[in-house]
Amino acid sequence: MNSIVILGNGAFPTEPYPLYLLDSAEGVVCCDGALEKWLSQDAWARPLAVVGDMDSLPQELQERFSALVVHETEQDYNDLTKAMRWVLREHPEVTEIVILGATGLREDHTVGNLGLLMEFPRLLDLGERKVSMVSDYGTAFAITGSCDLHLGEGRRISIFSADNSLRIGSTGLEWPLDDVVFDAWWKATLNRTSAPVVSLHFNHPSSALIIVD
C-alpha cells in the first residue's frame, strides 16, 4: 500500500483537490470521531482502522466497528500522532501519507496539529516518506534542511520554525528570508513565490513548516 489518508475530526474537505486525494488513496485511517464524518460519505469504502482514545466516538459506533478500533488510552500525544504511529507500524511500505480534516472547527486542534506536523520528522521514523496536511485552503508540509521547492510562480507561502538559531537563505521569494530571525511565528508568513523554484538554504539541520496555497 503506497498511499494512505489519515482523516482527522476537523473540517471535512469540500474542494476538488483534497477530495481527489481522499478518493485516490489506497487506504484511509480515521482518527476517533472522524469515523462519523467518513460514514456520512457513503460512496467511500471501509476504513483500515479507527485510532484514538475514543473520547469522541459514540459507544454504538465503537461496538459496530470493534474489529477496526485501535483504542490507545495514553494522553501524551493526540489522536493524529497515534494514527501516524499505527500507519507506520502496520504499513511500513507506505510512501505517502496525506492528512485531511486536521484543521478547522477548533483553533487549538489546528495549531496543535500543524505544530506536530513540523515535529513528526523528529518524533517518528519517516524516512523518505512524503507527509502533508491538506485542507480546502492549502497544503502544509515539513522540511528539515536545505532544499528546492518546485511550487510555481505567484503562490502564497508562509514559513514557520520554532528554532530561533535557524537562519534560512532563500531565492525565489518576493521577500527573501536571509535576515529573518525565527523568534516569533509570524516572522516569515504572508510571502509569495517570485520564481517557479524556491531554494532554501539552512545554516544547520532543523525543522520548518511550509504552508502554500
Image (cartoon, rainbow, N blue to C red):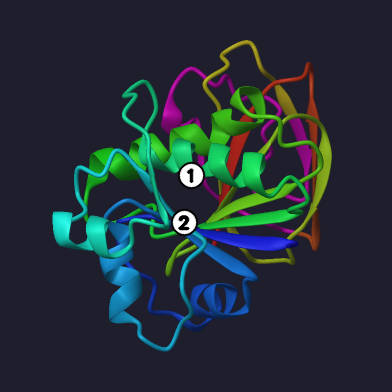
Task: Work out whether 71 lies above or below 102.
Answer: above
- Which of label 2 and label 1 is nearer to you? 2
Q: Secondary structure at mark 2?
A: strand
Q: Residue at x 46, y 82 (%)?
A: 44
Q: Can residue 177 be found in the magenta stretch? A: yes
Q: Amino acid at mark 2?
A: Ala
Q: Can residue 193 be found in the magenta stretch? A: yes
Left or right of residue 208: residue 172: right
Mark 1 lies on residue: 83
Q: Residue at x 59, y 32 (%)?
A: 120
The answer to whether one can see residue 115 in this image is yes
Quadrant of the snapshot with the C terminus: bottom right
Disc number placed over residue 70 in the picture, else none: none
Quadrant of residue 142 within the rendered picture: top right
Start-end of magenta stretch: 169-194
Structural crowding at the residue carrying mark 1, measured as other residues with C-alpha within 10 Å and reported as few (<14), some (14–19) or many (≥20): many
CA–CA distance between discs 2 and 1? 9 Å
Question: Where does residue 50 sit, x and y in percent of width and height?
Answer: 40, 54
Labels 2 & 1 near each other (Cβ < 8 A): yes
Quadrant of residue 119 within the rendered picture: top right
Q: Residue at x 29, y 70 (%)?
A: 37
Mark 2 lies on residue: 49
Question: Where does residue 111 sit, x and y in percent of width and height?
Answer: 35, 38
Q: In this orientation, which residue lies closer to the viewer: 37 or 196?
A: 37
The answer to whether one can see residue 159 in this image is no
Q: Amino acid at mark 1?
A: Ala
Task: Work out whether 44 lies above or below 33.
Answer: below
